[in-house]
Image (cartoon, helix red, strand yellow):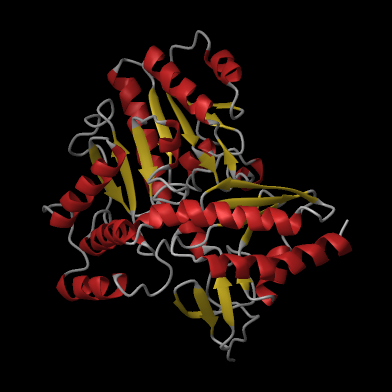
């Protein structure tokens, strides 16, 4: 029997609450389904498609790389790793890079770095500070670091060694770690994505950096979702004028090609040695070319500046359109990482927006998330507002 758009493929494991749309192809900020319907993509594969779809500079570069080599194992030097590492070091001011394939892998590597940092200092049971509402992945270790009991349910026992604190509360952080010699690191997202688009205050980031220096802890910032230009700087923490010791990256770094990275500053750059960590697909030539070309195009086309300018414009237009609605709480975020909070759970808006030809997501139950490609134009921002406003208006008028 031929599958219809509302029928999931028979043999694909049922791990996602999929919407009734089967993707076909895309161009820029637009996506078409297999029935020919056109959608404006406000989600970018959850902050992955930095350059949108079928970018005219990226596609030929990837085609050329595929014709040369897709994969080489890490028994050998891969020149693209050296080139991309140089670009990331230049952008971050840090020292060296480990390459993997996903954000989860990058965060796992960060946790391993922190534990080995502790063991190298003679700490037998290292502990890492993590945050309420954080999301770092779905492996057992990153799930344990994540602050969401709903997605942890059914997978216990969680990995030990984590201390959880609220965001933007330095006193709570100090109280939770007082007289604890086992603490080795603080691990946070500069902006919580899955947690509902919650920013760490810039002064708080500076204070945590100072506390880590004072107590000889690693300061680790998960930039998997908020990094790679999404906020208007290469990395969201740069708005605070600080530098972490460990920085996991993924998502937007490869514009859709699977890639992850851990960038390390001087304090963490030499913790791992040969045999301490690895990744079969990490650093393969295709992924490296995707990262190199993404960063090159971002610079050439001034996409950091565009992310800041279009993000400010889109947030202002959303606030103007939605603030009169009863049930609207606020628009928040930085650059093109935007959350619209309503006063009630609103997951149904994903389906309603799809019907209106707009791709987005809902996170933390009541926050509409927009993370469009960094190539977005003012006209496309206006179109997002035009498509989303009646959807939210109808939802708030008909729901309790």
Residue 19, quarter of picture: bottom right
Q: Residue at x 52, y 62 (%)?
A: 372
Q: Quadrant of the C terminus?
A: bottom right
**93 relative to 315, above or below:** above
Q: Is residue 67 left or right of residue 360?
A: left
Q: Residue at x 68, y 69 (%)?
A: 386
Residue 384 in the image: x percent, y percent?
A: 62, 67
Q: Is residue 154 left or right of residue 115?
A: right
Q: Residue at x 32, y 47 (%)?
A: 261
Residue 321 in the image: x percent, y percent?
A: 73, 59
Q: Is residue 103 left or right of residue 189?
A: left
Number of residue marks: 0
Identify the residue at the far top of this view: 179
Q: Is residue 132 visible?
A: yes
Residue 360 in the image: x percent, y percent?
A: 61, 63
Residue 149, quarter of picture: top right
Q: Is residue 162 visible?
A: no
């Amino acid at each position: 029997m031929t599958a219809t758009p509302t029928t999931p493929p028979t043999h694909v494991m049922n791990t996602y609450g999929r919407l009734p749309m089967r993707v076909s192809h895309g161009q820029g900020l637009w996506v078409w389904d297999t029935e020919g319907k056109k959608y404006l993509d406000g989600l970018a594969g959850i902050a992955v498609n930095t350059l949108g779809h079928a970018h005219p500079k990226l596609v030929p570069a990837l085609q050329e790389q595929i014709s040369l080599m897709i994969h080489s194992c890490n028994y050998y030097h891969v020149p693209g790793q050296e080139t991309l590492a140089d670009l990331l070091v230049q952008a971050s001011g840090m020292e060296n890079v480990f390459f993997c394939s996903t954000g989860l892998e990058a965060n796992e590597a960060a946790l391993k770095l922190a534990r080995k940092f502790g063991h190298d200092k003679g700490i037998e049971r290292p502990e890492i500070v993590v945050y309420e509402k954080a999301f770092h992945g779905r492996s057992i270790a990153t799930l344990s670091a994540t602050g969401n009991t709903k997605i942890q349910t059914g997978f216990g026992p969680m990995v030990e060694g984590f201390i959880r604190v609220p965001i933007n509360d330095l006193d709570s952080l100090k109280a939770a770690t007082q007289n604890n010699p086992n603490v080795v690191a603080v691990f946070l997202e500069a902006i919580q994505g899955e947690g509902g688009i919650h920013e760490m205050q810039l002064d708080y980031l500076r204070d945590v950096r100072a506390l880590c220096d004072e107590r000889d802890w690693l300061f680790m910032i998960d930039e998997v979702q908020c990094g790679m230009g999404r906020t208007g700087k290469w990395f969201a923490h740069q708005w605070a004028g600080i530098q972490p010791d460990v920085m996991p990256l993924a998502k937007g770094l490869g514009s859709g090609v699977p890639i992850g990275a851990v960038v390390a500053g001087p304090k963490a750059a030499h913790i791992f040695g040969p045999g301490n960590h690895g990744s079969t697909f990490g650093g393969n030539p295709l992924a490296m070319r995707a990262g190199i070309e993404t960063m090159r195009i971002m610079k050439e086309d001034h996409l950091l500046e565009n992310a800041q300018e279009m993000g400010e414009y889109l947030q202002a237009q959303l606030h103007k359109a939605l603030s009169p609605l009863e049930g609207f709480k606020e628009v928040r975020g930085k650059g093109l990482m935007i959350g619209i909070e309503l006063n009630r759970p609103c997951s149904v808006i994903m389906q309603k927006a799809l019907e209106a030809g707009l791709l987005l997501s809902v996170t933390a139950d009541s926050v509409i998330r927009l993370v469009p490609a960094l190539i977005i134009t003012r006209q496309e921002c206006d179109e997002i507002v035009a498509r989303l406003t009646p959807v939210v208006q109808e939802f708030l008028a008909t729901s309790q």
